[in-house]
Image (cartoon, grey):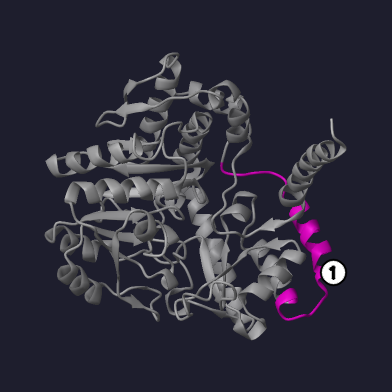
C-alpha cells in the first residue's frame, strides 16, 4: 500500500480518537443545537450494528406505522419503526408520527413540500432569518432555493424578542399563505401560536412549528404546548434538547379530512420524494430517548431553563448585554448575547474555543442578516451542561470563566486549565438510564 494512503488512514483514526477526548472530556459544550445522549442511548446505538446496515423503503399508513416495504427481511425492522413511532406519539400526545426523517432539515423539507402540494399554494409566512429562523425556512435556503416557495416574513418585535402577533395577523390575512411557520434556531421565548393559529387556518393555511431546538422542553411540559395552541405539524430534530440520536421527526394529529389530506402528501414527500434509506440504526435509540423524557423530561427541562436564566442574569449583572432582559432573558435552553463591546461574535467565539468553552457566533435581530461572518452576537445553550449535572452555582462559575475571557482578565491558557478541571468534575450523565439493563429493570416493574 502507498505510504500516503497509510498516513491518511492513520490520520483518520487518530483524529477520531483525539476528537472523542477533546470534545468528550476536555471541553464544556454550550452549542445550543447539540444534545447529549445517555449511556443507555449510546449503548443501544452501539448494539444496532446490523440494523445500521439494512435498507427499508416504502409507504406508511395514517397511524405512522409501516404499511408496505419493498425489501425482504423486514419483520423486525417493521416492529422497531412502529414502536419508535408509537413511543413518540405517546410522549407528545398525538396520533401520527413519521420517524423516517434523517434530520430536522429533512423534516422541514418533507413537511413544507407535502403541505404545499396539499394546498397548491407556494406562499409561506416565516420568522425573519435575522430574528432566529432556521435557514431551511428562508428564501435563500431550502424553502426558496430548493422548494421554490415564496417566503413572507412575520412582523418581529425586537424589544420583546418575539413575533408581533397583531401585525403578523394582518400579514397572514393579506398574504393568504399555504403555510404559517413558527419556531427557529434562536428561540428564547414561546411564539404566539395561540394568537395566530386561528387567523392562519381561516386563510386556508396549515400551521407548522419547527421545534428542533425546544422539542425536549415541550416533552417536559416546560415551554409551550404547540398542539394545544393550534399547531397542525411539529417538525424537529432529535438531538438537541431532545437528547437522542441524530435524526428528525414529524408529528401531527390525523383527526379529520383536512389533516388526512396533508399527512398523505407529507408522507409522499418523505418517500419517494426525499428519502430511500432512512438510517434505521437510530430508531431503537430514538425510542429509548423518548422513554427517558417520559420519565425524566420535566425535571430535565425545568433545570435546563433555570440554568439558562441564571446565566442570563449573571452575565447581565456583570456588564454584558443579554437580550430579552424585560422578559427574564429566556424561557428556553438558550440565551442571546450582544458582544460588540468585546470584539464581536466571531472573535469572541474563537477566543472562548481556545479556552475550551464551545459555543457559536450568531446574528441578532438588529444585525444585517447578510453579515454571517462577524455578527454581533453569541448564542449560548445549556442543555448539555444541565444533563451533566450543572446547577445554578455551577453555571455562575462557568459564566465567570466566560467573563475572564470576554474581558481579558486572564489568558485563555489559564482559563482553559480551569475549564478542563470544571468539566472533569462532571463525569456522569443525569436524567436518564446508565445502561440498557437498568432501563429493562425499570420497565419490568410495570410490565
Left or right of 372 in this view: 27: right
Counting from the top left corner in percent of width and height, residue 9 is at: 79, 37
Q: From which residue to which does the magenta span run?
A: 404-431
Helix or strand or loop: what does disc 1 sit on?
helix
Viewport quadrant of the C terminus: top left
Q: Tell me if I can see residue 258 in this picture.
A: yes
* Residue to which mark 1 is pinned: 414
Residue lying at 79% horizontally and 46% vertically, measured from the top left: 18
* Disc 1 crowd, CA 10 A, few/some/many (<14, 14-19, 20+): few
Q: Quadrant of residue 326?
A: bottom left
Name the residue nearer the viewer: 135 or 310: 135
Is 351 inside the magenta-drawn segment?
no
Position of residue 176 relative to residue 97, above or below, is below
Q: Tell me if I can see residue 253 in this picture.
A: no
- Residue placed furthest toward the right: 3
Counting from the top left corner in percent of width and height, residue 254 is at: 21, 39
Amino acid at each position: 500500500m502507498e505510504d500516503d494512503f497509510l498516513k491518511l488512514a492513520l490520520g483518520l483514526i487518530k483524529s477520531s480518537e483525539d476528537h472523542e477526548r477533546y470534545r468528550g472530556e476536555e471541553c464544556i459544550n454550550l452549542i445550543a443545537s447539540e444534545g447529549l445522549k445517555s449511556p443507555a442511548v449510546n449503548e443501544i446505538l452501539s448494539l444496532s450494528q446490523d440494523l445500521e446496515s439494512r435498507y427499508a423503503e416504502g409507504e406508511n399508513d395514517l397511524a405512522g406505522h409501516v404499511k408496505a416495504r419493498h425489501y425482504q427481511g423486514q419483520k423486525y425492522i417493521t416492529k422497531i419503526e412502529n414502536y419508535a413511532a408509537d413511543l413518540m406519539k405517546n410522549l407528545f400526545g398525538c396520533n401520527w408520527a413519521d420517524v423516517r426523517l434523517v434530520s430536522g432539515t429533512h423534516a422541514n423539507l418533507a413537511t413544507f413540500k407535502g403541505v404545499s402540494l396539499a394546498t397548491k399554494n407556494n406562499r409561506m409566512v416565516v420568522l425573519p432569518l435575522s430574528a432566529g429562523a432556521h435557514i431551511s425556512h428562508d428564501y435563500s435556503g431550502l424553502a426558496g432555493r430548493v422548494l421554490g416557495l415564496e417566503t413572507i416574513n412575520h412582523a418581529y418585535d425586537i424589544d420583546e424578542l418575539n413575533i408581533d402577533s397583531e401585525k403578523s395577523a394582518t400579514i397572514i390575512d393579506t398574504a393568504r399563505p399555504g403555510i404559517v411557520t413558527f419556531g427557529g434556531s434562536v428561540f428564547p421565548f414561546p411564539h404566539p401560536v395561540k394568537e395566530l393559529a386561528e387567523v392562519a387556518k381561516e386563510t386556508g393555511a396549515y400551521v407548522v412549528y419547527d421545534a428542533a431546538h425546544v422539542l425536549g422542553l415541550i416533552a417536559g411540559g416546560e415551554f409551550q404546548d404547540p398542539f394545544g395552541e393550534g399547531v397542525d405539524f411539529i417538525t424537529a430534530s432529535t438531538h438537541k434538547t431532545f437528547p437522542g440520536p441524530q435524526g428528525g421527526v414529524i408529528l401531527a394529529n390525523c383527526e379529520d379530512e383536512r389533516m388526512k389530506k396533508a399527512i398523505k402528501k407529507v408522507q409522499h414527500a418523505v418517500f419517494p420524494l426525499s428519502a430511500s434509506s432512512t438510517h434505521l440504526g437510530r430508531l431503537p435509540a430514538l425510542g429509548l430517548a423518548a422513554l427517558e423524557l417520559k420519565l425524566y423530561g420535566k425535571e430535565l427541562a425545568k433545570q435546563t431553563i433555570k440554568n439558562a436564566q441564571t446565566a442570563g442574569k449573571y452575565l447581565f449583572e456583570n456588564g454584558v448585554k443579554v437580550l430579552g432582559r424585560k422578559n427574564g432573558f429566556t424561557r428556553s435552553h438558550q440565551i442571546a448575547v450582544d458582544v460588540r463591546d468585546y470584539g464581536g461574535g466571531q472573535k469572541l467565539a474563537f477566543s472562548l474555543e481556545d479556552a475550551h468553552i464551545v459555543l457559536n457566533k450568531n446574528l441578532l435581530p438588529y444585525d444585517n442578516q447578510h453579515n454571517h461572518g462577524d455578527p454581533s452576537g453569541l448564542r449560548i445553550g445549556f442543555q448539555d451542561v444541565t444533563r451533566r449535572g450543572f446547577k445554578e452555582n455551577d453555571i455562575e462559575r462557568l459564566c465567570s470563566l466566560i467573563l475572564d475571557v470576554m474581558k481579558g482578565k486572564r489568558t485563555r491558557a489559564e482559563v482553559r486549565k480551569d475549564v478542563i478541571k470544571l468539566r472533569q468534575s462532571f463525569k456522569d450523565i443525569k436524567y436518564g438510564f446508565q445502561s440498557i439493563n437498568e432501563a429493562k429493570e425499570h420497565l419490568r416493574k410495570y410490565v
